[in-house]
Amino acid sequence: MSTLEQIKPAPPRPTAGGIRGWWENSRGFLTEVRNETRRVTWPSRREVYATTFVVILTSTFFGLYLWGLDLAFNRVVDWLFRRLGA
C-alpha cells in the first residue's frame, strides 16, 4: 500500500435527512475536528516569542521603508510641480 493510499480520507457516509441527519452530521463533524486538533503540533512559548519578534521587526522595517519612499516621491512630485509651474 502506498503512502498516498494511507493518507486518503475515508469515503463520505450516506447522510440521513431531516433533523436526525443534521444532528448526526454535526456530531461527525465535531468528532473529526477533535481528532484533527489532537494531531496539531503546537509551538512552544519560545517559538511564539521568536516569531512574534520577527513579525514586529519586519513590520517596523517595511513601515519605515515605505514612509521613506513616500517622502521621496512627495519631494519629487513637489519639485516637478514647482519646476513646471503647475
Image: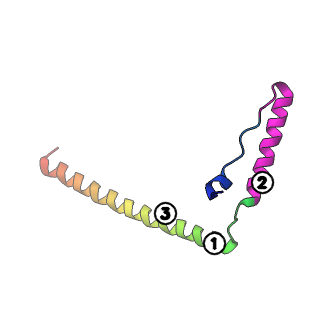
Question: What amino acid type should be assigned to the residue bearing mark 1?
Answer: Glu
Quadrant, the C terminus: top left
- Mark 3 or 2, which is nearer the eye? 2
Question: What amino acid type should be assigned to the residue bearing mark 2?
Answer: Asn
For residue 65, which quarter of the picture?
bottom left
Q: Which residue is mark 1?
A: 47
Upstream in the sequence, badge 1 or badge 3? 1
Q: Which residue is mark 3?
A: 59
**Magenta part of the chain:** 14-38
- Mark 3 lies on a secondary structure that is helix
Is 37 within the magenta?
A: yes
Give how far across and how far down residue 22 sits, in percent: 81, 31
Quadrant, the N terminus: bottom right
Q: Is residue 85 above or below residue 40?
A: above
Q: Residue at x 80, y 42 (%)?
A: 28
- Mark 2 lies on a secondary structure that is helix
Is 85 within the magenta?
A: no
Give how far across and how far down residue 81 sits, in percent: 19, 48
For residue 40, which quarter of the picture?
bottom right
- Give the dominant element type of the magenta stretch: helix, strand or loop: helix
Alpha carbon of mark 3 to alpha carbon of mark 2: how far?
Answer: 35 Å
Crowd tier of the residue under label 2, counting other residues whose Cα lies within 10 Å: few below 14, some 14–19, many 20 or above:
few
Q: Which residue is mark 2?
A: 35
| Residue contact between numbered discs 1 and 2, judged by CB atoms under 8 Å | no
Q: Residue at x 79, y 45 (%)?
A: 30
Q: Nearer the viewer, residue 45 or 67?
A: 45
Q: Residue at x 14, y 46 (%)?
A: 85
Q: Coloured how?
A: rainbow
Q: Is residue 86 above or below residue 71?
A: above
